[in-house]
Image (cartoon, coloured by chain):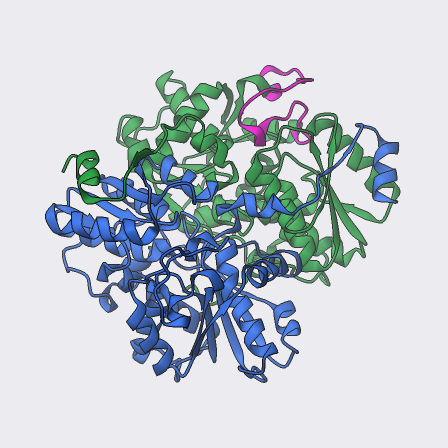
Chain colours: A blue, B green
Amino acid sequence: MSKSWPGLVTHYRDRLRLSPHAPAITLLEGNTPLIPAPKVAERLGGDCEVFLKYEGLNPTGSFKDRGMTAAISQAVADGARAVICASTGNTAASAAAYAVRAGLECMVLIPDGKIALGKLAGAIAYGAKVIAISGSFDDGLRMVREVADRTQIALVNSVNPARLEGQKTAAWEVCEQLGRSPDWLCLPVGNAGNISAYWLGFTECGDCSCGSKPQLLGAQAAGSAPIVTGIRVDNPETRATAIRIGNPARWQQALTAIEESKGTILSVTDEEIFSAYHFLARKEGVFCEPSSAAGVAGLIKSVDAGRVVVKDKRIVCVLTGHGLKDPDSAVADAPEPTRIEANLDALMRVIDA
Amino acid sequence: MSKSWPGLVTHYRDRLRLSPHAPAITLLEGNTPLIPAPKVAERLGGDCEVFLKYEGLNPTGSFKDRGMTAAISQAVADGARAVICASTGNTAASAAAYAVRAGLECMVLIPDGKIALGKLAGAIAYGAKVIAISGSFDDGLRMVREVADRTQIALVNSVNPARLEGQKTAAWEVCEQLGRSPDWLCLPVGNAGNISAYWLGFTECGDCSCGSKPQLLGAQAAGSAPIVTGIRVDNPETRATAIRIGNPARWQQALTAIEESKGTILSVTDEEIFSAYHFLARKEGVFCEPSSAAGVAGLIKSVDAGRVVVKDKRIVCVLTGHGLKDPDSAVADAPEPTRIEANLDALMRVIDA
């Protein structure tokens, strides 16, 4: 069963719009688990099934690897001499890893001072050239687009169409794992590449047996919710750093996906995001990064408000990145460990045994 | 292909010594990628094939999940009211996650002040009760063994035989992924549970088509190499925290595995470990925790010294944990990011385009 998973470019090759001669630059990404979430289902009132698509188990710890294997494979086919991206962290790590795999230099632009350690650690570990700009993610994206226009350096942000080709495969995996399409698919929305890619995947799922398409539920952080409010956010703010994006590149495409799917997009507060984040780790045993929990937070909020009815529905929540991407958030509100001497009596006392 | 991976207890159920009525407490662990490592092969002189068994892609970020799904499943069958372990970090995170999944309380003992942030973050995130002791891992292990003897609290360290039942499945996956047994299997050795489990797996691999068994190459950190030197280390020291263990619980079993496999065990310095760690990330695009790189470091050292001949051999190196477990090590020696203003001219200058 496991033996021959070849990575998603090879596995889905004939369904991806990539150059025929593009090599598969792979770290065997994709094929991530779909974990049952009975406690979330219970929180929603029961009478439904909930699953977590745990994208944090991609090689660099986030869903970005799906798009990156495709984008870097295409960049090699196109003769790029290097790759560049703007990033809140996850894209940087992924671009850096796949660039290594392809033997290309990688440069990443990050907003100075606002990136979680675990995320920057990835890009640094893989040897990327990290450039911190005194500006936002959106500033960085504008800059790298201009660089790509003027040079032989390939842009690997999700404005690169190959990225969506790779990312859409997650929709197919979900259908294969469930045996059919879910009724709802819930996910965080930042730059809106992922929601666009999932919708692309579901609409191209004609040759699988999933039947109908899901309704999409997108969640933005309240301090960074341009698609919800219809207004670009010049200084987006949220502790969910991966979706701190004020001017999404795939804004219109996301709106189309939500409309076509008869779905919804809403904003969730940081408090609601972190509440879902802790719930997932402490009740389901699934540790994701804070932004990943936004989809679950949005689902809970929508159901509580009566805007979404989940009775008898099968719901998939996409957890976009691993909790280890942002260890600081995990330890931030935690009590200090209990400290004891190294003897049995001391231990028996604290465990109350 | 991916759709029905049910986690390793269910997948391998009839080959694991667990109570028949034990439920499968699972996060869909196992089924991890075996990534080709052409640059390592080149470093060894070519004429061989090298693969990385990337165990960091288990749900909590390390191979410990394999043993833990089995141990917690068995603990539930045994009617445990809680679980406890001593840990250098990875076991703690894994025990905490699977305890959540089973609805059991989890207590973890860690050596105070010597655990990497990413590792402690896991246990904290999953809501474990973390107890820091003024002693070593070995002290902690002694203490939790005594607690388990006196209470209804299940010990889930690798002295628990169910742990090895789960962990041995990695050997089977390797054989299935390669289509046969590797010639060498290289891995880090700390408490020696993993090397014992792999050997158990390979010796029980009779009904798969792998044929012969691999030679095992175990690597211990030079400051914490009791099995290599034959002398217990009272104050083990290494920056590879996951293998900082001076009195391995599976010491004799590891020696037997090495002897029976006609393998070898050697010590590698922290410098050699970190050199391999950086090589894997920067040349192969695979980011592991420092201790995980010890197997690769030991392989390189043995080949350079002429102690192991790899011509025409197929070699698997086990990377036991994800690099995100220890982000501090990734950023420790790294140059600061280049800082620039958010404008195109500044960017064009630094990328030399």
Q: In the rendered view, does B163 fall on the left or right side of B331?
A: right
Q: Nearer the viewer, residue B273 or B109?
A: B109
> As displayed, is residue A136 above or below residue B278?
below
How many numbered marks are there? 0
Q: In the rendered view, does A131 fall on the left or right side of B276?
A: left
The percent position of residue A328, horizontal first and vertical second, equals: 55, 43
Residue at 49% over, 52% down? A322
Q: In the rendered view, does A135 fall on the left or right side of A75?
A: right
Residue B264 can be seen, yes or no: yes
Q: Nearer the viewer, residue B233 or A75?
A: A75
Residue A335 is drawn in which quadrant?
Answer: top right
Quadrant of image for the N terminus of chain A = bottom left
Region rendered in magenta:
B226-250
| Dominant secondary structure (helix, strand or loop) of the stretch shown in magenta | loop
The percent position of residue A80, horizontal first and vertical second, equals: 15, 46
Magenta region includes residue B241: yes
Q: Nearer the viewer, residue A204 or B194?
A: A204
> As displayed, is residue B90 above or below residue A241?
above
Residue at 34% over, 33% down? B337
The percent position of residue B236, horizontal first and vertical second, equals: 63, 20
Q: In the rendered view, does B293 fall on the left or right side of B70?
A: left
Residue at 39% over, 55% down? A235
Residue B312 can be seen, yes or no: no
Q: Nearer the viewer, residue B211 or A162?
A: A162
The percent position of residue B208, horizontal first and vertical second, equals: 48, 52
> As displayed, is residue A182 above or below residue A124?
below
Residue A131 is drawn in which quadrant?
Answer: top left
Quadrant of image for the C terminus of chain A = top right
Magenta region includes residue B112: no
Residue at 30% over, 80% down? A206
